[in-house]
Amino acid sequence: MDGRSLKSVFNRISLVSITVASLTLLFLYNYPQLPCLSYHSSLQPRFPKSSCEANHREVISPEKRSKKLFSSKDSKKRVSSFRNFFQPLRDLGLVSNSSKVLCVSAGAGHEVVALLEMGVRDVTGVEVVDTPPLVSRADPHNLPFFDGVFDLAFSAHIAEAMFPDRFSREMERTVRPGGAIVLALEGSWSAGELKEFNEGLFGRSRIVDARNVMLTGSQVMMAVLKNGVPRQSEA
Ligand SMILES: *[C@@H]1O[C@H](CO)[C@@H](O)[C@H](O)[C@H]1NC(C)=O
């Protein structure tokens, strides 16, 4: 195995991770302040009726908010792009309407909506920031699910994980033996790079299908891994 190219794959992943982590931190630090800042800088002197916090309490229901979130043209395009992306999985027999599917780092949940629209009834989306009712809050490095409960796990964001090896181990742990792990990896990957990615991060799975596809306007490598048998626990 060529250690140098494995290193370059990991370096590429680390660089993306650092950037995303920094942006996330900035976002988390700044975002909650914004409504209050704009209130305080308002030119009209007005007594606050309640605390800043109470002013911005969520009043619309999660269902309504979700409906609104996915009604824009842009959202519909994203959802339809995910539907096209997932279609081959159905053709390969990896997803049926009764599959239990997990979407890790699901963002606002466009992929969750796509799978539900395709007829998959049991879809779970997780993200570090929740978007009820479709995406719950969970740390992808420490998923709150028992071993082997999902038939398929999908993520388009393993490259941005703080610890890609923990992220991958959690996907392998929560998918049943024989189930599938599906990744959208940005950019183009050589067969060698993919193999080293597989061996470096997914020791219990092997790539059974890889193809270049478009996803939400970018070229990605769709990698399908078959999950192996769990490690024997010491008896
Ligand atoms: C799966 O669900 C979709 C959407 O509800 C439906 O059109 C399709 O017939 C279902 N497929 C099967 C095999 O039941």
Image (cartoon, rainbow, N blue to C red):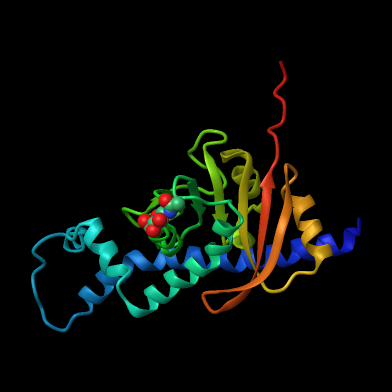
Q: Residue 223: which quarter of the image? A: bottom right
Q: Which one is nearer the viewer's eye here, 16 or 156?
A: 156
**Percent position of residue 211, x then y:** 69, 67
Which residue occupies the extreme bottom position in the image? 43
Q: Quadrant of residue 56?
A: bottom left
The answer to whether any part of residue 173 appears in the image is yes
| x and y, in percent, of residue 46 in the image | 9, 74
Task: Choose top left, top right, bottom left or bottom right for residue 213.
Answer: bottom right
Q: Position of residue 43 (x, y in %)?
A: 16, 84
Q: Quadrant of ligand 1?
A: bottom left
What residue lies at 49% left-to-right and 64% top-to-bottom?
24
Image-based side of 25 in relation to 201, left or right: left
Q: Is residue 91 left or right of residue 50?
A: right
Front residue (pair 167, 178) = 178
Whether residue 119 is visible = no
- What residue is at 68 percent from the left and 33 percent from the top? 230
The answer to whether 232 is drawn above or below residue 82 in the figure is above
User: Split into 4 quadrants, where in the image is the N terminus?
Assistant: bottom right
Report the quarter where the C terminus lies. top right
In the image, farthest residue toward the top: 235
In front of the other: 105 or 25: 105
The x, y position of residue 94, in whole percent, is 58, 51
Q: Is residue 148 above or below residue 73?
A: above
